Amino acid sequence: MNRLSTVSCISRIFDCLKGKEMSQKLEASAFPDYAPLTKAGPEYGKINRVNPFSGYTLRNFFSEEFREGLESKLSREPSNQDQYKRALLRVAEGFINGEEEVLMKVSPLVTGINPIHPFLEPSGAIRVQVPLPSNMEQLYILTDQILGNKTANSPNNDMYKLTPKGLADPDFPAPWLQAGNEKLYLKGSAPYNRGLMIWDDPSGYAGVNTKHRFPNLTLLLLSIVFQQTDVDAYGARGRYGDATLKRLLDGHGIQCSDEIPPHRIIALISFDSDSGMPKGYITAATYETEVPSTKGGTEMAKVIFNHYAFVPKSSDVPVGPKSMKMTEAMYVYMLAYITSYVTELPLKDHLLVAHSDKSPALKAVCKSFHYYPGNKMKYKMVADGAYNAITPIASREGGLKEDAEVAEFPHIQFYDQSTVPRDDPGEEVPVPADRFYTPVYMDFCRIVKKKNPGAIIPEHLVNGKIESKHIPKLREIAKKYGYSDESPLLIWMQSTGSYEFQEVQLGASLIDEELRVAPNFPINDRANFSCINTDKLTPKPNLEGQSLAAFQKDIQLFLIQVAKDGNTGNIDYGSIPRLTDFAYMVTYQIPTGYSSPMDWGVAMAVQHMALSFAWLQNNKINFLGPIVSKAHQKILKKDIVFLGTTAAGILIMSYGLVGALKTLSSPRSNL
């Protein structure tokens, strides 16, 4: 999705940066401009090789106190925090000096510069070249330098600045609840007490959070989390398009204006409730839209637009008497908050839509949620409305938007273009053995043939195979480990057992007799090199001080490249981009009723949330805006203890929280 060139926000953004005072009371139709908005620019090394940081000094990167503190400690043994500061300094020096190994680290640098700080991409995300913080102390060091208004850059106008206590600071403007003990976060990480925090309109764009708005902090923190999640899932940090990042603030991307009011964005943040370090998040937008009525004409429907979930591997969360996977639990609490405190309607009265380019998320939606054929026209209108909300007008004409015809996954309404840059670690190349991509690839073939009748496209989705162009690289790897040529490696890679995965105890081969990479090889996971088994490799590689893991990694990266080069879904076919570039708009409804675990989960989450807010977080409810505060006051007037009972849960499932409270107030109620 390209940026809308006629966005009217830009001039007002610069007014804001010059010190324009924000109105505390916003008109419903007014769209406030706040966070800086600049163009990403071309990637360094592709169109140009001009260093965008030429003329910058360390004053643009760090405060005087930061620089002097490092200089005074040069002769001492550095602490972990000093090591992190030195790593930041090293990147800054590499940027200033135009060192290509720094500018091109992880992935090519985008040349547009954020006016607040050069460590930020124009979108507001942390640059992938900047070291990620691993603890709260390092996170505070980073945010203090980037957003603390201590450098020679444009000011950060956030109304809240992060403190050393992070999200655990009692003054952080958002309520939260306990969510059990986290035992599995990342390998080597210690268990911690986990909190779930509600960010309702953190940018203030929807007019809810106007007194403590922090859009720049939002983008910085969430980008750190999604890059850490990418490392955990793919073994490398990924970049996302500017429009995608801006959707974290306003639900629309970058086209909001007075004429196109923003959606209300809500984020659930998982964090260490002791240290304050954010760990994962899920975001959604909620709004009303017009849909066909079953009685004829149209009616207004409540829509929940699920945007993103970035949650590294985590332990389960207790939800009532059972436990749920972390991502599922966060989704349940998101639904609980929206239905109880925003729309004030039961779960069954909502239509849901999601947009993703990741098959695990899409498979989860299609497996767990309902598609009712009778609501087909409603789903289509909701999906089209969501597309129009997030796609700049300039990109709609001539852009990719093709209706989907996948019987196995009727939830998919259409395909459009992903914003993940080409060859980025975060892009998902179709895996031939993935049950999602088998029928989707067939539909992809249909679209290619329809748009380009003369196009030749293979009938089946397969990975690439080793060709003559790949041999020099394989020979280089062979000689690195003591072989005279690549022959022993080719023989070994074709042997049964060279590739191990959970489903097949005896193993399989990395490549077949045609030298084609195995259909279920983890081509999107750079961290999964342990599946490569060298037991049958003879002679053994000469490691010379290197680890076996280094050899496995070299083979893995080689095979990933081979697989991607010839993957039939990773090839352009005329005017139709690669299937890799496809994103999917899906619509669905949550199964409800006593037999629905999701409905029970939402009801229990509502109970937990209402009780937590009433007993522990009452002083923070006002941060969520007048509508939520009013709903909270209704709860406080009722029997709080009763809210924790099974009977209350049944009422919430049937009527929603507000409806349940009304039922309790009825003179005819005997509960």
Image (tube, helix red, strand yellow):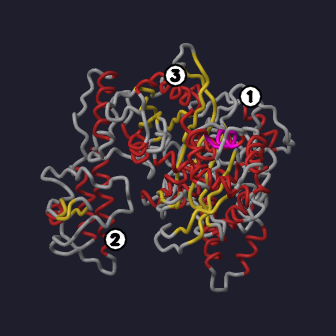
Q: What secondary structure do most residues of the magenta stretch adopt?
A: helix
Q: Which mark is residue 258?
A: 1
Marked residue nearer the N-terminal end (3 or 1): 1
Boundaries of the magenta span = 656-664
Quarter-of-image position of residue 525: bottom left
Residue depicted at 29% across the width and 24% down the height: 449
The residue labelled by disc 3 is 397
Secondary element at tag 3: loop
Can residue 154 be seen from the camera position used here?
no
* Kind of residue sitting beneath label 3: Glu
Image check: 596 left or right of 243?
left
Secondary element at tag 2: helix
Image check: 230 left or right of 628?
left
Residue closest to the eye, 488 or 652: 652
**Residue 496 sits above or below residue 657 on the image:** below
Mark in front: 3 vs 1: 1
